[in-house]
Amino acid sequence: MERRSNAHITHLLRNVQRGSIKPLWSLLEDWPKGSALPVTQSVLSILTFERQPAGNLDVEKFDHATAALLVLSRAMHEASREHADLKPPMTLLLLPRLDCIVSWISLCFRYGRNSDGVDADSDDESEGTEDEDPACKTKPAVMCVVQCGMLFCDILGYDPRTRIALQSSRIAAEFMVSLWLSCDADTGRPLFMLEPGVKVAQYYGCSINNAWSMFSGGSEAAKVAFLKRLYPDGNDTVVATKLIKVGIARLERMREACEQRQWESLIIGRNIRETLKTFEEYLALGIPEVLRAFHGQSFLGCAMATVCSLTRYLASTQKSSALGFSLTLLLDPIQSWPSLLGASPLDAMCLLIEGGSVNVLVDILVGVPWRDCKNKLWEESLQSLCTSILVWITAYGFYPSTSHALLEAIESVDEAQVADLMGRDAHWTMAIWCMLRGAVGLTRWVKSEAKVTKVCDNILCRPHLLDRRRTQQKECS
């Protein structure tokens, strides 16, 4: 790419400020090196509130706005790449105009949403037909929504100051809600991982999930603003239920992506990690309605089922080095979610076990190479994580209800996996499996004594014989 003359660049930027679209595409096709700041100034001069239409964009204004936003995104990337000293002045240019920029992104998003293929908030749970063309997921309208998400991510992640400013912006919160609720109009399912190409997907992950995590992360005000706009006409219970239901729908899309091998396992895994982490932050707010909705829905089971699918995907690609990734996804919920207010820790642990936490641990143990492992530090780290998970699970095995769930989970483990682990000559993976299996002894004892599984978690409950019938006696009030 030849360096353009200053006069030619000045001419291009003057035409940009006059409202011509052609120089914008010219800049994208042949970027002038060293011109990130003047290009940004010119683009910001047309991305103003005064130039916005009273209603929605028409095709011509949509094309113009899209080109301007793409040039702005390119200028931000170039400023970071060309010289480190350019980023602070670029940030100073952006900060007073952030609401204008996001407002234009929102207009472009609305244009794409109103086109065929995208619904901003669909409650239709119907599935697409078997003859449905998969290409519909990448139709221009859908890609417009994804592009808006990527632009929003660019600004959120550009500088801590831009992120803090957006987290306190009403316009940004409203756009974030619209983006996060985006669904495919044909299926009613959330949009997920529609980024154009592997490199873009590796950089952004799912831009919608990424934007939500970045916007919500580390800011209580941003999370509260998001919840307030999630369902403006509903009460707190309706808002909380919607938050959890949409979260479950997004996790199910991630699980489906794992099962269908739609993207690289670690790309999907990062989406799962960020989603679970962000939900944990919302739960940490301690809002009673959110906690009740969380415990009342199937979020825990869905989360574990998604992690289980990811682990099997990782194992199928022979990426044993990535198994630690699944372990951290498993360890964090087991350590923190049973201690949340609003429900019994035993109920939460039962849901985690029934959702597949034991299956995840077994899949990981089987995936660990036990002969001639060359990376001892990696193996020691993996052993430590597996032991931590074992301790947390077996600590609840003393209680009959969780012990019963644990027994059912262990009995469902594939026989080939059991044979693999039992043939490992006292390797630590075999030892952990044996300790996990031994944790269900209480349930086996209760079954043998009472012929039925005792479900009361009070340790003073004792099965006894009364009128020749097996019953259960509570010795406490």
Image: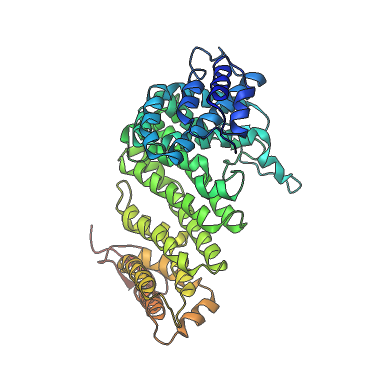
| Picture coordinates of residue 199, whole percent (x, y) | 56, 49
Q: Residue furthest left?
A: 476
Q: Which picture quadrant has residue 232?
A: top left
Question: Which quadrant of the rendered structure holds the N terminus?
Answer: top right
Q: Is residue 202 above or below residue 402?
A: above
Q: Is residue 257 above or below residue 24?
A: below
Residue 113 visible in the current orientation: no
Horizontal side of residue 399 vs 157, given as left or right = left
Residue 16 or residue 424, whichever sits in front: 16
Q: Residue furthest bottom?
A: 425
Q: Is residue 164 above or below residue 470?
A: above
Count of marks placed on residues: 0
Question: Which quadrant of the rendered structure holds the C terminus?
Answer: bottom left
Instruction: Identify which residue is drawn at 50% across, 47% down.
Output: 203
Instruction: Identify which residue is drawn at 48% across, 74% down.
Output: 366
| Picture coordinates of residue 463, whole percent (x, y) | 32, 71
Residue 263 or residue 390, whichever sits in front: 263
Instruction: Identify which residue is drawn at 37% across, 79% down.
Output: 428
Residue 163 or residue 142, whichever sits in front: 163
Horizontal side of residue 241 vs 471, given as left or right = right
Residue 19 or residue 242, whichever sits in front: 19
Instruction: Identify which residue is drawn at 37% across, 64% down.
Output: 402
Residue 80 visible in the current orientation: yes
| Picture coordinates of residue 210, whole percent (x, y) | 47, 42
| Picture coordinates of residue 243, whole percent (x, y) | 45, 38
